[in-house]
Amino acid sequence: MNLPARPDATGAEKEPLLTVADRVHKLLDRLTPAEHKAARVLLDNYPLIGLESLGKVAARAKVSHPTVLRFVNKLGYDGYPAFQSALRTELKSRLQSPLSKKTKHDLRGDAPDFLQNFADAICSNVQQGIGSLPRQQFESVLAMLADPSQSIYLLGGRITDAIAQYFYMHLRVLRSGVNQITGPSISWPDYLVDLDSTKRLIVFDVRRYQPDVIQFAQEAARRDCHVVLFTDQWLSPIASVAKDVFIAHIDVPSNWDSMSAMMAQVEALIAALNYRDWPRLEPRMQEHEAVRMHYQQIMKPPS
Amino acid sequence: MNLPARPDATGAEKEPLLTVADRVHKLLDRLTPAEHKAARVLLDNYPLIGLESLGKVAARAKVSHPTVLRFVNKLGYDGYPAFQSALRTELKSRLQSPLSKKTKHDLRGDAPDFLQNFADAICSNVQQGIGSLPRQQFESVLAMLADPSQSIYLLGGRITDAIAQYFYMHLRVLRSGVNQITGPSISWPDYLVDLDSTKRLIVFDVRRYQPDVIQFAQEAARRDCHVVLFTDQWLSPIASVAKDVFIAHIDVPSNWDSMSAMMAQVEALIAALNYRDWPRLEPRMQEHEAVRMHYQQIMKPPS
DNA sequence: TCAAGTCTGCAATATATGGTACAAAACACA
DNA sequence: TGTGTTTTGTACCATATATTGCAGACTTGA
């Protein structure tokens, strides 16, 4: 699925396609002797030396600080920090895809496969989102979900509402006392009356953080309601009032964010809850299944 | 979170081999709340965030500079530069071993546990689901989604309805003529009147295939409506009447199925659609954004 | 409720770092 | 050898960054 050359409307897209090393190679012969020394040191210790300070690099190359700086400017970066930033982003993508053939693709001008990149990015997000779960927090939320005496309220934003609903549908089967807050936000305050220290609010909020969701969560927290937040790596403002925060990366090579990692976290919670409390849950789930089957029967017109 | 008896290897600890992440995990529980936030930010963006400046990390974690510094000191490093230096050395060795094997395991020194298995299973599903997309079919569905003259109807089952909603929320922004079929299934037949050969039905159905969904899709197909199906590897009965079928694996080590791979497919479609038709979509999306912002403004009570 | 202790951000400070101006050095060419 | 140009390092400055002290905020336990 090599999508055709993308209309360059967003700009700033071309720069990252060239790695720092690429740029160095390209103008290696046009460099002055002292700058050449700096370039060699960079290439020989690529890329980590570039993350050291300007002075360290200069010392290693046995040239003066300004020489290194001039070299970096010639590479096309607006200052040493910009250069370091470019290195970091490069390093980031290299770390994410262990089988890093990316550079080769780029060098050849080969468009890397769009779908494959996309899948890789999502996997990376999923691994990150599940790997970084602090176990203690995970356990405590699990205990909370397992305790039927603690009523649970679920709320999501415009996009994340689907995740909230997904979670809701599962929790409904597993326990009682689960509520989904839906409808126009003007009607949400009705729920606030119920939200006190004996209740739990699970809220989803990702970037372009939604004012009405934030306000609701803050108000709930003010009423001593235990707030559990699912958010992205840039943290919703709700994070400061939430007792538990689950972070999932949502960035993928797209104009849209990806909720897959967040979904995975939710699914992990559901799976763990099941695993943990199976003896207690089994009868309830079987009954659930039986009731649903029976209901389907009586709804079906006799044919 | 090793749900089955945790191995909890108590081997002799090799001090010098402790990675930064190891240290963080070790004293995660002993950290103060603000320090905990810093730790989370570090782990969630590990390790590159640690190479940013103290201030950047503090800002990201929404705590003060000194808090981050105190956290770093607790880790056992003599100042922030020392901490960064440790990260660089660690990164260096990781970059040298080409197949950076199972980072998560190494970082924790743990046996693979429940969560890790879960994440691996999901990733495998995602890769499979996206890798196996026939490109021609992908392209044709893409063209269909891009054509505003073809009205689209979305339908999901009990669990997959959340995915349908998720897709709907995105498509709504990208184009007009998108409808979500919701509510009790008894009311769905109303929609059938509209479904003819000029309309497209996108239906989600996974195992325990839902009779009402199946029946609706079959009836739509009989009326010459082009049906696109998202299903699992065991194929919903709808597959036989659908013009396009997307298959996602849904099995994970859990009593519940995982919709993550299906979600990833949907997100890939959205991303590709964006990528492909960006020039045409951009004005619409910007207007969408502007309208939403403006609406938020006028809804906000003057304070 | 109060008092002891802990935690945390603000502000001040010291230091490191990046950036610039300029002059010495090296070079090219007559 | 001299002159104009390029290259390079020194010295300086401005800013960013790390570090420390302290006081207010918060928690804890009686």
Image (cartoon, coloured by chain):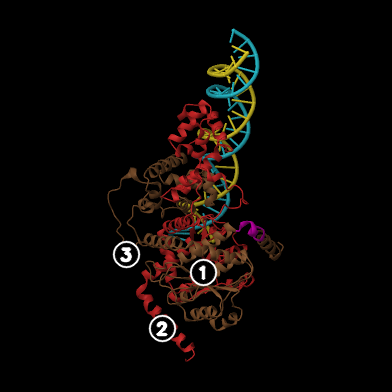
Chain colours: A red, B brown, C yellow, D cyan
| Residue A70 x %, y % | 56, 31
Q: How many marks?
A: 3
**In this image, B182 relative to B71: left or right?**
right
Span of residues in magenta: B277-285
Helix, strand or loop at label 3? It is: loop
The structure residue drawn at horizontal position 39% and vertical position 52%, both measured from the top left corner, is: B25
Image location (x, y in percent) of residue B174? 61, 63
The residue mark sitting in front, 1 or 3, is: 1
Q: Check residue B297 in the rendering and tell me which mark sits there, or answer none.
A: none
How far is disc 2 from disc 1 in space, using C-alphas?
25 Å
Q: Identify the main secondary structure in magenta.
A: helix
Chain ID of residue with mark 3: B
* Residue B4: numbered disc: 3
Residue A34 location in percent, x, y? 51, 26
Q: Are marks 2 and 1 on the same chain?
A: no
Tell me if label 1 and label 3 are in contact, CB under 8 Å.
no
Would you say residue B280 sits in the magenta stretch?
yes
Residue A290 is marked as 2
Q: Secondary structure at mark 1?
A: helix
What is the distance, in whole Å, between disc 1 and disc 3 at their CAs? 32 Å
Q: Position of residue B301 (x, y in %)?
A: 70, 65
Rendered image quadrant of residue B146: bottom right
As for residue B177 lying within the magenta part, the answer is: no
Chain designation of label 1: B
B12 or A102, which is in the foreground?
A: A102
Q: Amino acid at mark 2?
A: Ala
User: Contact (CB < 8 A) between labels 2 and 3?
Assistant: no
Q: Earlier in the sequence, mark 1 or mark 3?
A: 3
Q: Which residue has dot 1 on it? A: B163
Does A179 sit left or right of A140 as displayed?
right
- The residue located at (40%, 61%) in the rendering is B124
Q: Nearer the viewer, residue B215 or B225?
A: B225
